[in-house]
Amino acid sequence: MSFKIRIIATRLVGLLLFCSIPGVALAVPDTISLRVTDVTTCTFALVWMTDVPAVPAVEVYADAGMTTPVTDGITETAMPDVAPAVAAAATANGIMKVRVSGLVAGTRYYTRSVTRDPAHTDSVGYSALQEITTATQVKPYATAQDGSLLGVVNDMTTMKMYIRPADQSAVPGLGSLLLVDVANSAWPLSAFVGDGVAAPEGVIDLNNLFGADRISKAVSGGEVSQIRFYRGGAFSTLLHYRRIASRSGTGQSAEPVKGFFADINLDGTVDDTDFEAFKNQYRTAPDDAVYNPDFKFVQTTNGNVGAQDFTRFSREYGRTDVPVQ
């Protein structure tokens, strides 16, 4: 089933969930690619995409049955800490983010997104319920071999989003959302493209990472990361695998490192997982919504992912000795 057919099917299903008004059927806004991000000891955020320039909100509960709302002492902020132009561009593209603050460390909460269509106030979409336990400890230091404490400062990571040649936006990429998942971290971090840095670049502060133990995570460099861009419109998401740059210890910005071209997921082998990823990109063109330049291994005039790229990939297929770059 093609991407376009899947989107049409999703919207047809949505039409079955409408608010009945005589002569009018209001489709419920879609909720796509929902993620819990930016979890700390007292905050978390929800990010998602929708098919309308919506008003985002969330609901927070103390139980999975949604019988006990959590409202006292918490604050919900839509499009948090974002410049107005960035927030407007994100909203126009259906890219949503809401931050919840005032939470208790190490506490379990249940949350769902609420997407309201401003053109039809009775048209509201809800996501599935998400379970989240806040981080337990901010620990901005490490213990040396002699027992002394050493301060830890992670860098910021920056990456530019691929812009399709036909994109005629005034500021291409503005308002897209950058998500970074670092290996062995508990939650991804997110930031809007063009916020605090020129679009189409986004910047993530790795000091906000927490490990699987929900304690602040020090990043030394070389960790495999999954970097996603939410681009809105046709629910387009681009996924890139990169290694975090070596830590400078000064908090500077650094671009993540691209690995061996055929080892798509950076696991040290070129196998069926990499082939499946390549197969999904085969015959895509630079203006396609799903086009990913990571799969263009041989430069050609038209830029399409084609036979030459497959030939180069196939020569590496089966390798188990891929070096870490």
Image (cartoon, grey):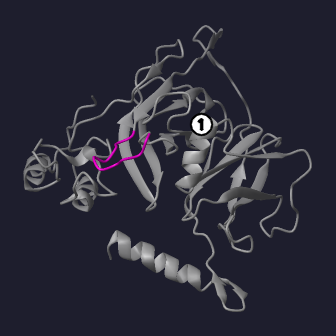
Instruction: Kindly tell me whether residue 201 is visible in this rendering.
Output: yes
Measured as percent of width and height from the top left, residue 189 is found at 57, 39
Can residue 127 be found in the magenta stretch?
no
Residue on which disc 1 sits: 211
Measured as percent of width and height from the top left, residue 282 is found at 19, 59
Q: Residue at x 33, y 77 (%)?
A: 1
The magenta segment is 161-170
**Looking at this rendering, what residue extends furthest in the right direction?**
72
Instruction: Kindly tell me whether residue 35 is visible in this rendering.
Output: no
Give neighbour class at mark 1: few <14, some 14-19, many 20+ (Cα, 10 Å): some
Instruction: Give the side of residue 44 with respect to residue 287, left or right.
Output: right
Measured as percent of width and height from the top left, residue 143 is found at 62, 16
Instruction: Give the side of residue 224 with respect to residue 49, left or right.
Output: left
Q: Main secondary structure of the magenta part?
A: loop
User: Along the line of sight, which residue is nearer the eye, 282 or 67?
Assistant: 282
User: Along the line of sight, which residue is nearer the eye, 128 or 146?
Assistant: 128
**Looking at this rendering, what residue extends furthest in the bottom direction?**
22
Q: Residue at x 27, y 61 (%)?
A: 280
Q: Residue at x 28, y 56 (%)?
A: 273
Can residue 164 be found in the magenta stretch?
yes
Q: How many marks?
A: 1
Given the image, on which type of amino acid does mark 1 rest? Gly
Where residue 261 sits, quadrant-wise, is top left
Measured as percent of width and height from the top left, residue 251 is found at 54, 16
Instruction: Give the side of residue 158 with respect to residue 78, left or right.
Output: left
The relative height of residue 206 versus residue 148 in the rendered view (above or below) is below
Where residue 162 sits, quadrant-wise, is top left
The local secondary structure at tag 1 comes to loop
Instruction: Give the side of residue 158 with respect to residue 121, left or right.
Output: left
Q: Residue at x 57, y 79 (%)?
A: 14
The relative height of residue 225 versus residue 10 in the rendered view (above or below) is above
